Image (cartoon, rainbow, N blue to C red):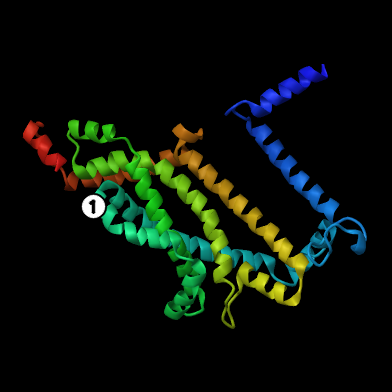
């Protein structure tokens, strides 16, 4: 019986790409967190001299969480979290507004992509620690510097991911669109962008988590009357030797990022229900919102349809 139970357990765990229910996924995630907390407790349990890891290196869970009220009340945790989140959101929104149109253009037109490739490569590989002094020279040490730092750190990745998503769309969809009489702009806006949108959204969702980590570097410097944010708080606690506070912020950051990621995951399911299993509420709302624009565009740019001859088809392909 024990052997049979073990066999079933191994099949459940080791079957390649076997689907996992949402309840099982949550349970396994909670088990992982509890296992990590247990390991943390074990290596920091006991008197200071008998611990596997000393308190100066890693405080125990009880010692760490006992400082949470102090971090919340005396060091304005909520205010610093909101300030950091605002900086990341504005900087990343700017990166999306600039990066997605450029990336779509580069993905549609190979010569544009070849022209931009050196800048994209530099933007993806330049050390961010080297960029920070330049951002201070250009924008100063204030709020604008931190927002633009997130923009610079993210925009090359957004351009690259958007271009790659467009280029990964199969050529048969373009051929079908041209066969049905679509123009170049209609093929881009009605075929390429909608098909690439789920991939672009997934890439941007992952990139936002990285941008939330980048802000820690930018917030290491602040001016007098500015709210420091979580990054500056870590610097202050390091100087004062408040190890428990640093570990608490390290725990707070992924918790905030997890909440944001779940919100983005819900938006993703609502926008792309055919891929992620949502009910499509936001997708329907977007369609309703675009109806007046489509009606206006058809009135302004209406052209009498003509039959597609082979010459017209060749002209569209140019």
Q: Nearer the viewer, residue 315 or 112?
A: 112
Q: Is residue 112 left or right of residue 312?
A: right
Is residue 295 left or right of 62 when viewed as pictured?
A: left
Task: Indicate whether 282 appears above or below 111.
Answer: above
Q: Nearer the viewer, residue 79 or 298?
A: 79
Choose top left, top right, bottom left or bottom right for residue 156: bottom left
Q: Quadrant of residue 20?
A: top right
At mark 1, the secondary structure is helix
> Where is 307 relative to 109, above or below?
above
Q: Residue at x 41, y 54 (%)?
A: 158
In the rendered image, which residue does mark 1 sit on? 111
Name the residue at 49% across, 42% down.
Answer: 268
68 relative to 182 in the view: left or right:
right
Q: Residues within 10 Å of mark 1 (few under 14, many from 20)?
A: few
Work out whether 41 lies above or below 64. above
Assign the C terminus to one quadrant of the image.
top left
Residue at image location 69% in from the left, 63% down from the top: 249
Vertical position of residue 279 compared to residue 236: above or below:
above
Q: Is residue 192 visible?
A: yes
- In the drawing, does residue 183 fall left or right of residue 163? left
Q: Viewer-proximal residue, 66 or 28?
A: 28
| Image position, residue 89 (x, y; %) | 50, 60
Residue 108 at x, y = what percent?
27, 47
- 43 or 228, which lies in front? 43
Q: Quadrant of the N terminus?
A: top right
Q: Is residue 304 visible?
A: no
Q: Position of residue 275 (x, y in %)?
A: 46, 34
Residue 48 image position (x, y, % from top left): 90, 63
């Amino acid at each position: 019986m024990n052997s049979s139970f073990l066999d079933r357990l191994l099949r459940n765990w080791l079957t390649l790409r076997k689907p996992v229910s949402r309840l099982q996924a949550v349970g396994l995630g909670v088990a992982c967190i509890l296992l990590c907390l247990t390991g943390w407790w074990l290596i920091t349990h006991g008197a200071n001299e008998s611990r596997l890891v000393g308190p100066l290196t890693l405080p125990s869970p009880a010692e760490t969480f006992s400082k949470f009220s102090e971090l919340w009340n005396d060091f304005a945790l909520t205010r610093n979290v909101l300030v950091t989140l605002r900086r990341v959101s504005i900087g990343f929104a700017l990166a999306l507004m600039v990066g997605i149109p450029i990336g779509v253009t580069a993905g549609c037109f190979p010569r544009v992509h070849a022209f931009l490739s050196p800048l994209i490569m530099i933007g993806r590989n330049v050390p961010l620690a080297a960029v920070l002094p330049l951002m201070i020279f250009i924008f100063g040490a204030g709020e604008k510097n931190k927002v633009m730092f997130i923009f610079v750190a993210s925009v090359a990745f957004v351009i690259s991911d958007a271009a790659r998503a467009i280029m990964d769309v199969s050529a048969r969809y373009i051929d079908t669109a041209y066969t049905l009489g679509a123009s170049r702009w209609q093929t881009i806006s009605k075929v390429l962008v909608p098909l690439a949108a789920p991939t672009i959204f997934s890439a941007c969702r992952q990139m936002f988590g990285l941008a939330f980590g980048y802000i820690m570097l930018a917030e290491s410097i602040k001016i007098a009357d500015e709210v420091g944010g979580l990054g500056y708080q870590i610097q202050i606690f390091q100087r004062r030797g408040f190890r428990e506070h640093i570990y608490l912020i390290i725990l707070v950051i992924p918790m905030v990022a997890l909440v944001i990621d779940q919100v983005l995951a819900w938006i993703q399911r609502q926008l792309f229900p055919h891929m992620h299993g949502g009910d499509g509420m936001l997708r329907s709302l977007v369609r309703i919102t675009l109806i007046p624009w489509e009606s206006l565009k058809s009135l302004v740019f209406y052209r009498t349809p003509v039959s597609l001859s082979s010459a017209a088809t060749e002209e569209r392909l140019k």
